[in-house]
Image: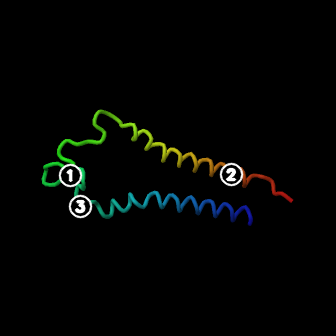
Amino acid sequence: MTAKNKWLVGVGVVIVLLMLFALPFVWQILFPAQGYGIWGGMHMRGGMMGPGFSPLYGGMGFGTFFMWLIPLGLLILIGLGIAALIKYLNAPPSQ
């Protein structure tokens, strides 16, 4: 496989990943939600949990802190993958 083909495959994978990341946002723009779901609405009486319920009452919860580790880890893996791809493509060809 030539270096040009490797770059095309790498760029194609990045474009597909970006599209997969953006599709939910595009879907929400094209087809906005029609209700409030479990957290609110229900004729202004509060949601299914009752009025005034908030999972973040009193500040950020302990679980919310760990929730941010998943996207952070994903971004780190993407960065390491790009760095490995660049290192692999710049390495001299072996015999």
Left or right? Give the position of 45 relative to 53: left
Q: Nearer the viewer, residue 4 or 64?
A: 64
Between marks 2 and 1, how big is the CA–CA gap? Answer: 51 Å
| Kind of residue sitting beneath label 3 | Gln
Q: Nearer the viewer, residue 90 or 62?
A: 62
Residue drawn at point x = 68 percent, y = 51 percent: 86
| Kind of residue sitting beneath label 2 | Ile
Residue 29: x and y, percent? Answer: 33, 60
Can you tell which of label 3 and label 2 is closer to the viewer? 3
Q: Dot 1 corresponds to which residue?
A: 48
> Quadrant of residue 63 in the image?
top left
User: What sort of colour scheme is used for the picture?
Assistant: rainbow
Can you tell which of label 2 and label 1 is closer to the viewer? 1
Residue 2: x and y, percent? Answer: 74, 65
> Quadrant of residue 54 in the image?
top left
Residue drawn at point x = 45 percent, y = 43 percent: 68
| Quadrant of the image containing the C terminus | bottom right
SS at mark 3? loop
Q: In this view, does 51 lie above or below 22?
A: above
Lower sequence index among marks 3 and 1: 3
Between marks 3 and 1, how big is the CA–CA gap? Answer: 16 Å
Lower sequence index among marks 3 and 2: 3
SS at mark 2? helix
| Quadrant of the image containing the N terminus | bottom right
Lower sequence index among marks 2 and 1: 1
| Kind of residue sitting beneath label 1 | Met
Q: Dot 2 corresponds to which residue?
A: 86
Q: Dot 3 corresponds to which residue?
A: 34
**How many other residues sit within 10 Å of disc 2, few (<14), some (14-19) or many (≥20)?**
few
Query: Label 2 near label 3: C-beta < 8 Å?
Result: no
Residue 89: x and y, percent? Answer: 72, 55
